[in-house]
Amino acid sequence: MSDINRRSFLRAGAAVAAGAAIAGPFEGFVAHADRGRPRSGGYGPLSPVADQRDGVVRLELPRGFQYRSFHPAGTVLDDGAVLPGRHDGMAAFRGRHGRTVLVRNHEINGNTNVAGGDRPLGDPANGYDPIAKGGTVTVEVDGFGNVFHDWVSLSGTQMNCAGGPTPWESWLTCEETINGGDVGPDFTGVPNTGLRKHGYVFEVPAHGEASGQPLTAMGRFAHEAAVTDRGGRVVYQTEDNFGFPSGFYRFLPDRRRRHHDDDDDGDRHNGWDNGRGRGPIVNRGRLQMLAVRGVPNAELHLGQPDGVSYRVVWVDIDDPDPTFAPGTTNNEAISAVGDEGRAKGAALFSRLEGAVWSNGRVYFTSTQGGSASDATTSGFGAGRGQVWAYRPGAERLELVFESPGSATLDLPDNVEASRRGTLVLCEDGPGDNFLRGLTRRGELFTFARNADPAQVGQEFAGARFSPDGRTLFVNVQSGTGYSVAIWGPWHKGPF
């Protein structure tokens, strides 16, 4: 990849961004970005609140808000499976009788062949890879955290981190790994011998079980989130490549979808059809990476000028699903798809994680992007976080927010948008972790703090509002983690 001098990049960035200060959502933040990051009162100060499940204080919340935790690790599901920990990204769909159906990832690495390996999630015979331990769980729950039904909806996958809902009521769950029998031991030292290839997106129906067929055309890399546009024509994907540059991708599915395809060649769709002439995603199409027009390998992981906006183009990935030669290391494999894009000029980001569609834009987080370095950081990128917005059609990439330090926003991960367009940012920092809000006026506020003494330093993940907007569901991610339903006077504040 190109070795770009930062000053020349910023000059070039200023040229391509000339006259492009952001107008519209979040313009207030940009206008005041150099004056201390404006803050809003949000819903007011936080105070300890007891969990309605058992009276233990697990969260600090504003006055009037309540919550109940549910689905702690170890819960026995209706299908007999034991619920693992590491609750991560999820989606919320309409259920029966006003309830919500949550499809939730469990970010579990490794395999059962390793000494001391845990049991897989669900029945190995039904999984994509019988020795892989991750997957998704679906739970029907009311707005107060009471569980009515739950089951394993995908098994045999690894490191299911984030993903995204589709307009036809399915969940795209993403593997944040490229493990497989063709790759050497991963970053934890776990050998991959015997595993099927991993690093894919899988589609899970909201009210059923997945076929377990990977969407290989969407790429084999360390996937994080997926955002499908309203028409189902494009899927935008983020990449969380911890030790290396990350990319922002889009997948253009082949619109000539087959309705009957039983030859098991990987082209078939995932076994259900909503009857509305779109979806599920077909396993054919073009994978592309974002590049800044006129600035090859733009170093967007570095500190950015306030209010900067870039014109962008897309470069094709010719080999989205590589199979690696014997002796290929994990480090070589995990960067392979991104390296192909960067050889054509794709932009460099630091740890792209959560993504959401709102106000005609794709908002996504760069967890370690920016120039703030007031706390210890390892991996690629030394900042405390950025929020970007991509505008389809206009082909613009806009910096919405760059954290000036860990006390303001510390390593944003998953992101959600309320009906009013306010973003919910889940922190994944090394100390106290918070749910922060970023309003369309550009005001940042704190909504919740992880106050569970048994979960000190554990991240928030998977924030999603219920379809009626009355409940915010979120996960506390750890080996002993759980989900939480939060409700209260939303009308009194920006959510």
Image (cartoon, rainbow, N blue to C red):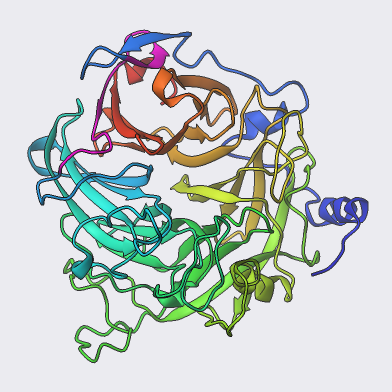
Q: Nearer the viewer, residue 134 or 445?
A: 134
- Taking the spot 70% from the left edge, 67% from the top edge, the residue there is 346
Horizontal and vertical percent for residue 110? Answer: 42, 59
Q: Residue at coordinates 39% horizontally, 52% vertically from top-left?
A: 108
Q: Is residue 452 visible?
A: no
Q: Which residue extends farthest bottom?
A: 263
Q: Quadrant of the N terminus?
A: bottom right
Whether residue 61 appears in magenta in the rendering, the answer is yes
Q: Residue at x 74, y 75 (%)?
A: 343
Horizontally, residue 379 falls left or right of residue 49, namely right
- Count of number-bearing discs: 0
> Horizontal and vertical percent for residue 216?
42, 76
Relative height, residue 465 to residue 109 (above, below): above
Residue 183 left/right relative to 118? right
When the figure is inspected, residue 136 is found, relative to residue 447, above or below; the finding is below
Q: Nearer the viewer, residue 331 or 94?
A: 331
Residue 35 shows in the view = yes
- Is 467 left or right of 48, judged from the image as shown? left
Q: Which image quadrant is residue 115 in?
A: bottom left
Q: Is 210 on the left-hand or right-hand side of 80?
A: right
Does the segment drawn in magenta span residue 63?
yes
Q: Position of residue 166 (x, y in %)?
A: 33, 58
What's the magenta region? 57-76
In the picture, which quadrant includes the C terminus?
Answer: top left
Q: Which residue is most to the left?
A: 97
Question: Percent position (x, y) of residue 323?
Answer: 52, 82
Residue 109 position by quadrant: bottom left
Residue at 35 percent of width and 49 percent of height? 106
